[in-house]
Image (spheres, rainbow, N blue to C red):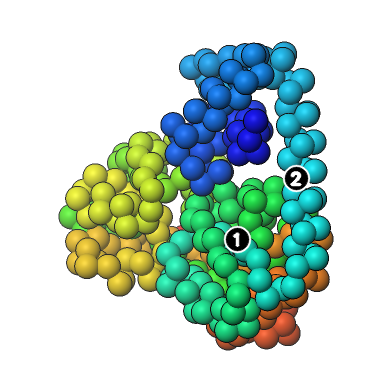
Amino acid sequence: MELYQLRSFVAVAEEGHLTRASERLFSSQPTVSSHIKALEEQLGLRLFDRTTRGMILTDDGQIMLDHARTILNQAESMSRKASAIKTPEGGLFRLGINNALDFLRADQVVAHMVERYSQMKFQIDQGSSGAVLAAIARGDLDAGFYEGENEYDEIDSTLLTHIPISIVIPRQWSEEFQEPDWAKLQTRPWVFVSTLCSYYRLIERLEQRHQLRLDKRFEVSEDQASLSLVARCVALSVLPVQHVEESPLRDRVAFWPHFQHAMPLHIAYRHDRAHEPRIRALREICQEVWGQTEERAKQAELVRPPQRLSA
């Protein structure tokens, strides 16, 4: 029995769906499915009922879930103890990113971390903001970048900046969408990176506010794929303004002029680890790279720019 099998088991049990569990684990759906199958064979139990609505725990699976969580918590505790014993110069640092390295300036951050901790190894995992936060809460990541809101009490974060984002439409549809008619957004399909993405959750709030029912038809692996579908007149999307302006596809798309939003970008870490030298160093470096001191970060929280959800 392997710990990764137990992690997959717990993730599927909590998400109730293989696709969401695989994203949360930064893994593929076939890999997670194979972990579950292998664990069921080793235990001689059926852990899930597979239905059209997703993966439903059996009675046996519910009993095993409590044991699996206990084992994983003990393993994580042992790992943290080992990290505390070792010198901070070495060891593995697991960083989560929710966007491209250069967009987050995470490449600069890692370069500065290497200068301070020359023996440290790095594991960098990419996923949506929701997946990064969940991984930090579980202890699968030491820290990570995320946009939007943090719903975890056990996670602290430091504000770095605000990312301008906008609804992006094919340039050929500009005349169709020139009026500030939110209902018009229902007439075309949409593309998103993930249901755990902060942009997806923002659009859900817009739906509620404007009583919309959007056609969320496409899910892709990264922002560039979303932009490509928009440029091909396939769908609408929500993307960082910088991504669009720097893309070779920028002349084939346009911003819907009736929406703007400033999405907060944070570096996150568990509250009970905020005092660790490596976490403190990461926080300081992130603030240096983004040009913010502790005091400026606090001021930014107090006087952040307005985040308009509607025109």
Q: Is residue 141 above or below residue 36?
A: below
Picture residue at 51% right of the left edge, 33% below the top: 32
Q: CA distance from mark 1 to mark 2?
A: 16 Å
Picture residue at 75% right of the left edge, 62% below the top: 83
**Mark 2 nearby-residue class (10 Å; few <14, some 14–19, many ≥20):** few
Residue 177 image point, x, y percent:
29, 53
Q: Is residue 235 above or below residue 39?
A: below
Amino acid residing under circle 2: Ala
Query: Is label 1 or label 2 in front?
Result: 2
Residue receiving disc 2: 75
Q: Secondary structure at mark 1?
A: strand
Amino acid residing under circle 1: Arg
Q: Secondary structure at mark 2?
A: helix
- Tell me: 218 left or right of 53: left
Residue receiving disc 1: 94
Picture residue at 24% right of the left edge, 60% below the top: 253
Q: How many marks?
A: 2
